Image (tube, rainbow, N blue to C red):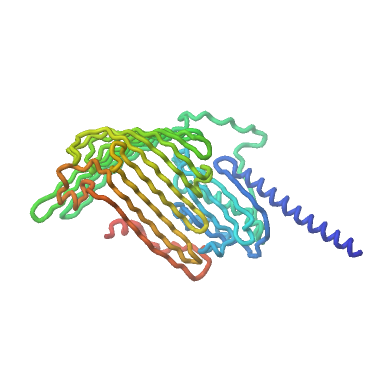
């Protein structure tokens, strides 16, 4: 065979290999998409090189602890779990948000690294409000297993990968027509609890309950919530006894209309009665509009929104205020900027809000909040959170001032011009890169911790 013929044969073999690889990847993607039909959604992109390891190395990140880290690693024991994303072939980030079913929508992002850096995938598992914790975590693990399939195919372990699909109907049967929802997408939830605790010099009793109704569709979101809390406290001091009674009752209703991928508008109504704020009744009606700098479809991974609210509030006080008022009508406006990011380098959330009353612009407040968990380099993470507020709108303060008991027990909200809280910390992990073994022996029970002081 001459040189040109050998070159053409080599080129044909290389082309055939690339074509076969593309057909195999496409077929796998179609099969996985079929399995994910129903409550699971998928988005994927990329295809690429092989991994020389026997199996893939996976780093788990995000809100996975609520599902049980040990459970995920026990169920998926055919990959190497690592403790630092720098060592991983696949970086998994789990995030969640409320779903219309009353449950949660768990978004699982698969970010390829190293030989897999050309591929990213996103799967979604939606749980129901009635799902147990085991049903939720089993559903999320199923999504993780499906998402790891294309990456496992790039390793020698991929030859052992088997894909199957459970039949929901017999052969030849027609698919069932969707049933009409008798609840019209409404989901209701109620709760009631009580607590009693004490010792020789103090007693505390409380009762709280809640009721909520929610209807969420792609175009509209309607929510109603009612919360109540009543507390009694008794403190026996050397010369006398302090009795404290507090109550909080809140109700909120809102209707929100979707206006595309970047806008939303709604109307909110609030009513409350709070002893700590010297308010016998507080009712507020406020239209709100919001702009999202990123599409709402990216909400689980990144969010930057600007929200403007203008509202009218009617207040009836329990005691005469510093401004010589027992009731008044107030009008104000507020602007709030919110940022939330979940990325391979860590998590960050922050917001800044400002509001003022129209009848006196000197009556205002400004609040800023921030929380960050950032990986600076391998094994080293920095955590920071803080809040700061300028407070110049405490119209509810009682004219009689605060007693020592009010200050010590925080029965009433105290007069102040500012509030702040800051925390900072770091963690450093080193040693073996693998983090897959699960050993629950002598882990301890929960009952002794429940009563431990």
Residue toward you, 349 or 333 = 333
Where in the figure is residue 431, as x and y percent of width and height?
49, 71
- 305 left or right, relative to 243: right
Can you say which quadrant of the picture contains the C terminus? bottom left
Tell me the residue at 51%/40% (across/down).
262
Residue toward you, 138 or 232 = 232
Residue most toward the right?
A: 2
Tell me the residue at 40%/49% (across/down).
351
Q: Quadrant of residue 113?
A: bottom right
Where in the figure is residue 373, as x and y percent of width and height?
44, 58
- 92 left or right, relative to 52: left
- 14 left or right, relative to 92: right
Residue most toward the bottom?
A: 431
Where in the figure is residue 122, as x and y percent of width and height?
57, 49
Instruction: For residue 148, say whether it is visible.
Output: yes
Can you say which quadrant of the picture contains the N terminus? bottom right
Residue toward you, 434 or 4 = 4
- 335 left or right, relative to 127: left
Where in the figure is residue 316, as x and y percent of width and height?
23, 34
Tell me the residue at 28%/59% (across/down).
452
Is 158 drawn above or below residue 186 in the view shown? below
Instruction: For residue 73, say whether it is visible.
Output: no
Residue most toward the left?
A: 239
For the image, the number of numbered tags is 0
Q: Quadrant of residue 41?
A: top right
């Amino acid at each position: 065979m001459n040189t040109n013929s050998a070159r053409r044969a080599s080129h044909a073999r290389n082309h055939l290999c690339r074509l076969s690889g593309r057909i195999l990847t496409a077929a796998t993607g179609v099969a996985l998409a079929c399995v994910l039909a129903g409550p699971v959604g998928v988005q994927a992109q990329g295809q690429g090189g092989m991994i020389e390891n026997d199996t893939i190395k996976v780093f788990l990140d995000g809100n996975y602890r609520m599902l049980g880290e040990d459970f995920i690693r026990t169920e998926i024991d055919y990959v190497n779990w690592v403790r630092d994303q720098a060592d991983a072939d696949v970086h998994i980030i789990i995030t969640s948000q409320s779903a219309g079913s009353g449950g949660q929508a768990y978004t699982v992002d698969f970010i390829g690294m190293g030989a897999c850096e050309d591929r990213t995938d996103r799967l979604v598992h939606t749980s129901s409000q009635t799902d147990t914790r085991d049903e939720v975590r089993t559903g999320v693990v199923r999504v993780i297993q499906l998402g790891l399939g294309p990456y496992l195919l790039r390793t020698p372990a991929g030859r052992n990968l088997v894909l199957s699909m459970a039949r929901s109907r017999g052969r030849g049967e027609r698919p069932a027509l969707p049933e009409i929802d008798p609840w019209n997408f409404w989901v209701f939830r109620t709760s009631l609890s009580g607590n009693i605790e004490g010792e020789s010099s103090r007693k505390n009793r409380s009762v709280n309950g809640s009721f909520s109704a929610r209807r969420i569709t792609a175009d509209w979101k309607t929510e109603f919530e009612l919360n109540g809390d009543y507390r009694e406290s008794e403190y026996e001091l050397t010369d006398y006894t302090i009795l404290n009674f507090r109550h909080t009752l809140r109700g909120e209703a809102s209707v929100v209309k979707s206006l595309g991928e970047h806008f939303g508008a709604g109307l909110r109504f609030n009513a409350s009665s709070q002893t700590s704020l010297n308010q016998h009744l507080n009712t507020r009606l406020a239209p709100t509009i919001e702009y999202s700098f990123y599409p709402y479809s990216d909400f689980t991974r990144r969010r930057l929104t600007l929200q403007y609210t203008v509202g009218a509030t009617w207040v009836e006080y329990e005691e005469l205020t510093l401004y010589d008022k027992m009731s008044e009508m107030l009008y104000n406006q507020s602007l709030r900027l919110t940022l939330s990011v979940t990325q391979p380098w860590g998590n960050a959330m922050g917001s800044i809000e400002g509001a003022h009353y129209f009848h006196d612009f000197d009556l205002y407040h400004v609040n800023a909040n921030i929380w960050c968990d950032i990986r600076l380099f391998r094994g080293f993470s920095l955590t920071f959170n803080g809040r700061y507020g300028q407070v110049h709108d405490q119209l509810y303060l009682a004219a009689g001032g605060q007693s020592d008991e009010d200050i010590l027990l925080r029965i009433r909200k105290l007069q102040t011009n500012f509030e702040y809280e800051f925390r900072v910390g770091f963690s450093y992990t080193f040693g073996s890169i693998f983090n897959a073994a699960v050993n629950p022996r002598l882990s301890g029970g929960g009952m002794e911790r429940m009563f431990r002081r």
